């Protein structure tokens, strides 16, 4: 069953700047789809449209069989419960003036009627919940009281992941989640995402310019260039069949 | 907590903040308890003792109606500083929400609010305040209204600018994707970033407004005789300036010290916050 269907999506910023051109793809429940492309290919625009931060001119987005209209508050509330996003810059995605536990609990506070499954017993204090969340992403619970400035880049991104999965979304959009991290930490974060996906049965849309990161995590990959999809394939077919020249160029650049 | 601020400031060499705080302590205590220490009534006319020099009875002498100058200065401190502070607080209470709404919501709301602000801003504020006070009639309440009307726009403008930068930050976007209401996002993520700048601005602004209040009283649009507002005292002393220049010197010094205090506080707080934000030292 398709969890997300994007049909003919177009987004125009100005007369001369079309970020997305009639983009169509679908996402199956439980799979992880990679979106690759260079800077300016429309990857981030796609992420921001899908999370409801930006509007679009043409096309339709269907999530779990119901259409998503941007900028309407009531449907967005239910949608955002199920779709969460991890941002590119781990550091600036956390408010420097708030302790980690407050940042972590912001989504859950907005959905007070929802009790995630990792909260096994009633009557946990806010900080207990935050510490449990930190445990889910492999962080020490004593980080809860710290401020973002006191954490490393990898730890910050783990906090961001913990916040995103706190609502137990069915779809997780990752917009270059490893771009601001060094290589060893990148691998740790990707491994964590892979584990969480299996544990919580999350569908992942993984956006990156780094085709190596995408091949590590995703079974299916689409390639964007200047807002259009130029190629799509299963990971197993990456080397088998003849690929689009642009995909080849990306692969060569990553020396795979 | 105050001593903690002083200690960290001293260790960082923030002379402005320390001097400003010391002056503030002095001025506040004079304003609050000075009245009970001066044995004279600021309104008591005593024509037999007019234009006296300093003595053990009248420490700073008496004015042209024989009233004790020290008593009038101390009484006037409450009025002048109180009025300046109240004016700025009210201006902040109006200007900051307008700036937050305008900057955060943007679009048509922003355009309308900012055109109103631009309209008011295009008049020199002193002239505009004179016009408002002139139309409403000369007294302290109307002066307060006039000052608030010309000052709130400054806060609206500055806060809007700050919000425009803040709302681009990723943690504000994250807050939106967490489905926080606009009010919650502003309260949790934007307002805390804006408050330090508002405090710095307000500290300097209170000094400016005290000058404004005194200027208005001096030209006869603010406090009316016999109210001992400092600007009004300057105005009263003007006719006797050649006989007794100290009549103008004392309120002049009082105004100067108070404005200096608020300016030092403002500058000191600015460097204090800049250091904390890692923008380098003073």
Image (tube, coloured by chain):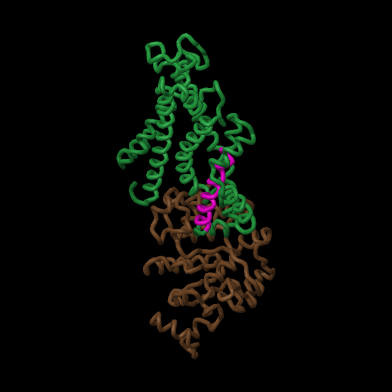
A119 or B124, nearer to the observer: B124
A92 or B72, nearer to the observer: B72
Question: Which percent across, then down, holds residue A170?
Answer: 59, 65
Question: Is B163 in the magenta?
Answer: yes
Which chain is tinted green? B
- Main secondary structure found in the magenta portion: helix
Furthest-top residue in view? Answer: B48
Question: Is A43 in the magenta?
Answer: no
Question: Which percent across, then down, holds residue A112?
Answer: 62, 51
Which chain is tinted brown? A
Question: Does residue A61 appear left or right of residue B280 in this picture?
Answer: right
Q: Measured along the vertical axis of the image, is residue B177 above or below residue A44? A: above
Q: How many marks?
A: 0
B21 or A34, nearer to the observer: B21
Question: Does residue B29 appear left or right of residue A173 in this picture?
Answer: left
Residue at (43%, 53%) from the top-left corner? A148
Residue at (48%, 49%) from the top-left corner? B193
A212 or A203, nearer to the observer: A212
Question: Which percent across, then down, holds residue A217?
Answer: 48, 73
């Amino acid at each position: 069953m398709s969890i997300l269907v994007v049909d003919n999506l177009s987004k125009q910023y100005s007369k001369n700047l079309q970020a997305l051109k009639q983009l169509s793809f679908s996402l199956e429940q439980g799979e992880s789809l990679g979106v690759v492309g260079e800077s300016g290919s429309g990857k981030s625009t796609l992420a921001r449209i899908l999370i409801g931060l930006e509007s679009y001119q043409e096309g339709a987005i269907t999530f779990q069989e119901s259409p998503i209209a941007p900028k309407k508050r009531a449907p967005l509330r239910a949608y955002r419960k199920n779709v969460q996003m991890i941002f590119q810059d781990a550091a600036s995605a956390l408010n420097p003036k708030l302790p980690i536990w407050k940042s972590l609990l912001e989504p859950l506070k907005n959905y007070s009627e929802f009790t995630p499954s990792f909260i096994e017993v009633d009557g946990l204090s806010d900080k207990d919940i935050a510490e449990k969340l930190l445990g889910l992403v492999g962080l020490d619970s004593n980080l809860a009281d710290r401020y973002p400035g006191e954490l490393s880049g990898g730890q910050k991104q783990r906090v961001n992941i913990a916040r995103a999965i706190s609502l137990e979304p069915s779809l997780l959009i990752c917009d270059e989640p490893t771009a601001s991290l060094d290589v060893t930490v990148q691998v740790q974060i990707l491994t964590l995402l892979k584990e969480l996906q299996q544990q919580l049965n999350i569908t992942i849309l993984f956006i990156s310019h780094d085709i190596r990161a995408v091949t590590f995590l995703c079974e299916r990959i689409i390639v964007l260039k200047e807002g259009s999809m130029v190629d799509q394939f299963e990971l197993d077919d990456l080397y088998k069949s003849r690929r689009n020249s642009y995909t080849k160029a990306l692969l060569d650049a990553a020396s795979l | 907590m105050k001593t903690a601020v002083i200690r960290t400031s001293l260790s960082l060499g923030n002379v402005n903040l320390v001097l400003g705080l010391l002056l503030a302590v002095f001025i506040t205590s004079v304003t609050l308890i000075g009245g009970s220490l001066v044995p004279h009534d600021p309104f008591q006319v005593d024509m037999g003792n007019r234009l006296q020099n300093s003595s053990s009875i009248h420490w700073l002498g008496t004015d042209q109606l024989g009233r004790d100058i020290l008593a009038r200065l101390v009484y006037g401190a409450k009025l002048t500083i109180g009025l300046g502070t109240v004016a700025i607080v009210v201006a902040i209470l109006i200007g900051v929400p307008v700036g937050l709404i305008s900057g955060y919501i943007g679009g048509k709301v922003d355009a309308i609010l900012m055109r109103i602000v631009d309209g008011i801003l295009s008049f020199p504020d002193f002239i505009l305040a004179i016009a408002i006070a002139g139309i409403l009639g000369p007294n302290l309440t109307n002066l307060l209204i006039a000052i608030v009307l010309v000052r709130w726009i400054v806060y609206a403008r500055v806060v809007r600018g700050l919000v425009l930068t803040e709302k681009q930050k990723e943690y504000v976007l994250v807050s939106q994707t967490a489905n926080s209401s606009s009010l919650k996002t502003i309260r949790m993520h934007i307002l805390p970033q804006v408050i330090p700048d508002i405090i710095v601005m307000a500290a300097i602004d209170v000094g400016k407004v005290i000058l404004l209040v005194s200027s208005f009283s001096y030209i006869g649009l603010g406090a009316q005789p016999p109210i001992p507002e400092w600007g009004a005292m300057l105005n009263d002393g003007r006719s006797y300036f050649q006989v007794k220049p100290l009549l103008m010197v004392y309120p002049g010094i009082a105004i100067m010290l108070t404005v200096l205090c608020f300016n030092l506080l403002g500058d000191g707080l600015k460097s204090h916050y800049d250091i904390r934000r890692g923008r380098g030292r003073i």
